[in-house]
Amino acid sequence: MTADHTSATGPAPESKAKPRRKPANKKAADSNSTSGWNQWGKNAGEICARQEELIHSLLHSPDTSEQIRTAFDQFKDELTSITNTALSTDDAVEMLAQHIVVKPVLDAIYPDYPFTERNALAGCRRACLPA
């Protein structure tokens, strides 16, 4: 036999590789492929809830400046105008928290386009959340 596994009488027999094992059922395959997204969604939800708590505590703190409260009220008014819906303070806090959490993800997805800086609420968000 030579280095390329041929002999004087012909090539070596083909190896019998085992076929790839398929999942027992489609549901198992789907759950394996989405489990990472499910965990990310759960984590993002928990982070949003913590952000909501922080925003509420900031808005209700006696140490919070009137400028921040006014900026939040403007943010809420802008949301109401854009969505054409009456929003509660809790609704506005929830949307602000979601914006905070999703912003880095969108910035990573669109690195060459300032997506989160050009949407209608970015200016209000910046006013509400000074550095």
Image: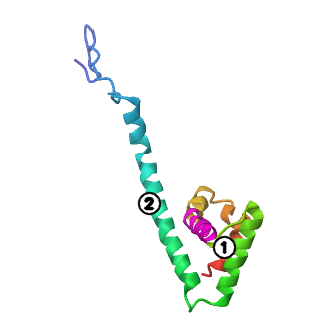
How many neighbours does mark 1 have within 10 angstroms: few (below 14), some (14-19), or many (20 or more)?
A: some
**Does residue 61 appear left or right of residue 67 in this picture?**
left
Give the quarter of the figure containing the N terminus: top left
How many neighbours does mark 2 have within 10 angstroms: few (below 14), some (14-19), or many (20 or more)?
A: few
Q: Where is residue 19 in the image (x, y as percent from the top left)?
A: 32, 23
Which residue in the rendered view is the most extreme toward the bottom? 63
Look at the image and say whether residue 45 sits in the magenta stretch: no
Q: What residue type is labelled 2?
A: Asn
Look at the image and say whether residue 101 sits in the magenta stretch: yes
Which of these two is toward me, 111 or 16? 111
Are the two marked residues, 1 and 2, in contact with CB atoms closer than 8 angstroms? no
Q: Residue at x 32, y 27 (%)?
A: 21
Q: Position of residue 5 (x, y in %)?
A: 26, 20
State how many labels appear: 2
Q: Where is residue 97 in the image (x, y as percent from the top left)?
A: 57, 68
Residue at label 2? Answer: 43
At mark 1, the secondary structure is: helix
The residue segment tinted magenta is 90-102
Vertical side of 45 occupied by 125: above or below: below
Residue at label 1? Answer: 125
